[in-house]
Image (cartoon, grey):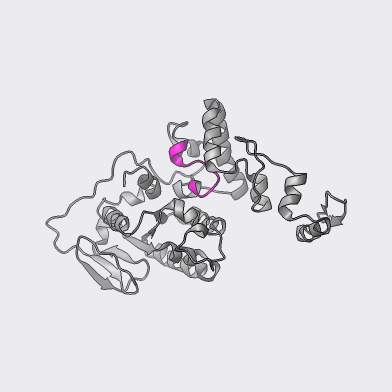
């Protein structure tokens, strides 16, 4: 039996949700006003009506902002907050079929607290995820990552892909070379566990994940996997800015993709590929510093969540 969609204003039935939504104009209602009228939902912290973006988001959202979510959790008894936080992970497992503990980028791009916030209520975030049946991909970045020096290795250099249009300037020599994937790699792969860095401006990152270029990017990820390489997608913009890119003056207003769409795709890639990480840093100068530290940190990038380490200021 096919599902029926019934208008709460007049009781008329429709064969599809799209037809129902088109019908709302008969009553002088927009989609947002219809759902807020007939299915009102309120922010658990301040009691204000939940803002409507999409139907799915509206019925899944309990807070209008992450700040409200955080304040509400801090106002509850610890056991209630732990129960709620555990429920958020369980919901991702049930609804999105995730199999790996969500990383910092995943949580920060959802209506969910970051790993750093989770650690206020749980001794070990990764152990919590393991107890829920999720794969633990990383260990805690508890200490500041120290870049090892190789003073006797005068041969070390950074390979820069020949297609890189705005190459970064490092503190060690560099050499232009055609790379099969990524933009930067150390010439001695054994020191980095075959690590490559794909540098992106925010605009380039958005374009890469958008519909037109997404499949091509996935093929690049697959090539890295075939070569048993680690691929770090490093974006020269803070994650906070990336999440609100429609409001940034240096991002074209012609871009139709939304942050919700872009980061939905990113979360899917993170769950699917264990050799890929996304890392958002504060500009080009930071990009240089972080890449050099990654290349000379004895493969720590394979063990830790880089965004979490960066947010904790241990990277």
Q: Which region of the structure is painted magenta?
A: 108-117
* Residue situated furthest right in the rendering: 11
Residue 82 on image: x %, y %: 53, 31
Residue 117 shows in the view: yes
Main structural element of the magenta stretch: helix, strand or loop?
Answer: loop
Tell me: 39 left or right of 246: right
Verify whether residue 22 appears in magenta: no
Looking at the image, is 60 positioned above or below residue 171? above
Q: How many marks?
A: 0
Where on the picture, by quarter, is residue 63?
top right
Where on the picture, by quarter, is residue 223?
bottom left
Tell me: 15 left or right of 236: right
Looking at the image, is 203 positioned above or below residue 91? below
The residue that appears at 30% across and 52% down in the rendered structure is 299
Q: Nearer the viewer, residue 117 or 36?
A: 36
The residue that appears at 21% across and 50% down in the rendered structure is 148
Looking at the image, is 180 positioned above or below residue 89? below
Residue 132 shows in the view: no
Residue 104 on image: x %, y %: 45, 46
Residue 225 on image: x %, y %: 41, 62
Q: Nearer the viewer, residue 193 or 290?
A: 290
Residue 112 on image: x %, y %: 53, 43
Verify whether residue 114 appears in magenta: yes
Q: Quadrant of the N terminus?
A: bottom right
The residue that appears at 76% across and 60% down in the rendered structure is 18
């Amino acid at each position: 039996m096919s599902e029926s969609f019934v208008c709460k204003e007049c009781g008329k039935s429709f064969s599809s949700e799209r037809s129902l939504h088109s019908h709302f104009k008969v009553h002088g209602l927009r989609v947002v006003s219809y759902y807020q009228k007939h299915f009102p939902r309120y922010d658990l912290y301040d009691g204000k009506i939940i803002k409507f973006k999409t139907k799915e988001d509206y019925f899944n959202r309990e807070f209008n902002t992450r700040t409200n979510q955080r304040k509400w959790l801090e106002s509850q008894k610890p056991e209630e907050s732990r129960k709620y936080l555990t429920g958020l992970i369980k919901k991702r497992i049930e609804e999105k079929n995730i199999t790996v503990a969500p990383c910092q980028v995943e949580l920060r791009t959802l209506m969910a607290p970051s790993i750093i916030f989770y650690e206020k209520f749980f001794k070990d975030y990764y152990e919590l995820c393991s107890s829920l049946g999720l794969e633990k991909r990383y260990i805690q970045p508890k200490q500041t990552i120290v870049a090892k020096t190789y003073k006797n290795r005068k041969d070390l250099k950074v390979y820069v892909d020949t297609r890189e249009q705005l190459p970064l300037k490092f503190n060690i020599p560099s050499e232009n070379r055609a790379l099969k994937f990524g933009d930067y790699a150390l010439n001695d792969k054994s020191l980095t566990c075959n690590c490559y860095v794909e540098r992106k401006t925010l605009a380039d990152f958005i374009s890469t994940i958008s519909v037109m270029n997404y499949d091509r990017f996935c093929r690049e990820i697959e090539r890295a996997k075939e070569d048993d390489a680690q691929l770090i997608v490093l974006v020269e913009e803070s994650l906070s800015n990336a999440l609100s890119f429609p409001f940034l003056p240096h991002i074209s207003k012609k871009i139709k993709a939304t942050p919700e769409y872009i980061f939905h795709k990113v979360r899917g890639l993170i769950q699917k590929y264990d050799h890929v990480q996304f890392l958002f840093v504060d500009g080009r100068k930071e990009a240089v510093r972080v890449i050099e530290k990654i290349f000379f940190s004895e493969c720590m990038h394979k063990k830790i969540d880089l965004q979490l380490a960066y947010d904790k200021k241990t990277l």
